Amino acid sequence: MPSLLVLLLSLSGLVFFAVRLVTDPAAWPTSAVGVAACLLFAARNATLFRSNRTIETTPSLSEICDVATLDDALGSERAILYKHSTRCPVSSVVINEVLRFGETHPDWKVYVLKVIERRGLSNTVADRLGVPHASPQAFVIKQGRCVWHTSHSGITEQRLSRHAA
């Protein structure tokens, strides 16, 4: 729903600046920039929305929707637990790193926890692992223990691979 709201706001901004462009020729430079900004913002939002939707259809990820699945993830012999925000542009980039890890390490289970939709489970992860919440955030689990964690731009396929070895 937030994506629809952002799209509507972008379109209303676009209409505002387009009308201003036509009715006030002296404001042409700022109106042109406003039109371009609204178009860029709408395009970025659409890309983020599509990127976050692909998570649901990716077979290499298991989504954590309940405590039982969270227990499986935290008790795994070898797993990556990835906390993802469906509203965060950094998450929409980092998810590709996690997916690459899953593709190059088929012997590892990769779990994704959508923090906006599953706030309670996200808080449970922070409590059980003793690691303050961040998103995006990744944990390497070996033999039921978190052996490494990082967040934001620290999440790369290369770093996940290094700590999974």
Image: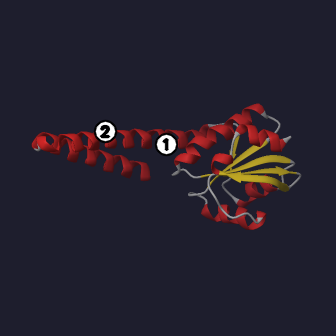
Quick one: label 2, few (<14), some, or many (20+) residues within 10 Å? some
- Say which mark, if any, is on residue 103: none
Q: Residue 155, percent across and down? A: 68, 45
Q: Residue 137, percent across and down? A: 67, 53
Q: Which image quarter: residue 100?
A: top right
Mark 1 belongs to which amino acid? Answer: Leu
Is residue 155 found left or right of 45 in the rendered image?
right
- Give the residue at x 82% y 51%: 141
Quick one: label 1, few (<14), some, or many (20+) residues within 10 Å? many
| Secondary structure state at the residue bearing disc 2 | helix
Is residue 40 found left or right of 113 in the rendered image?
left
Figure label count: 2
- Decide: is 129 above or below 9: below
Is residue 1 shown to the viewer in this render?
A: no
- Closer to us: mark 2 or mark 1? 2
Give the residue pinned by disc 1: 48
Answer yes or no: do the residues labelled 2 and 1 have beta carbons within 8 Å?
Answer: no
Q: Which image quarter: residue 109?
A: top right
Mark 2 belongs to which amino acid? Answer: Ala
Is residue 142 shown to the viewer in this render?
A: yes
Quadrant where the C terminus is found in the figure: top right
- Give the residue at x 77% y 63%: 129
Give the residue pinned by disc 2: 36
- Give the residue at x 75% y 42%: 159
Depth order, front residue of 135/26: 26
Q: Residue 119, percent across and down? A: 60, 62
Between discs 2 and 1, the one toward the N terminus: 2
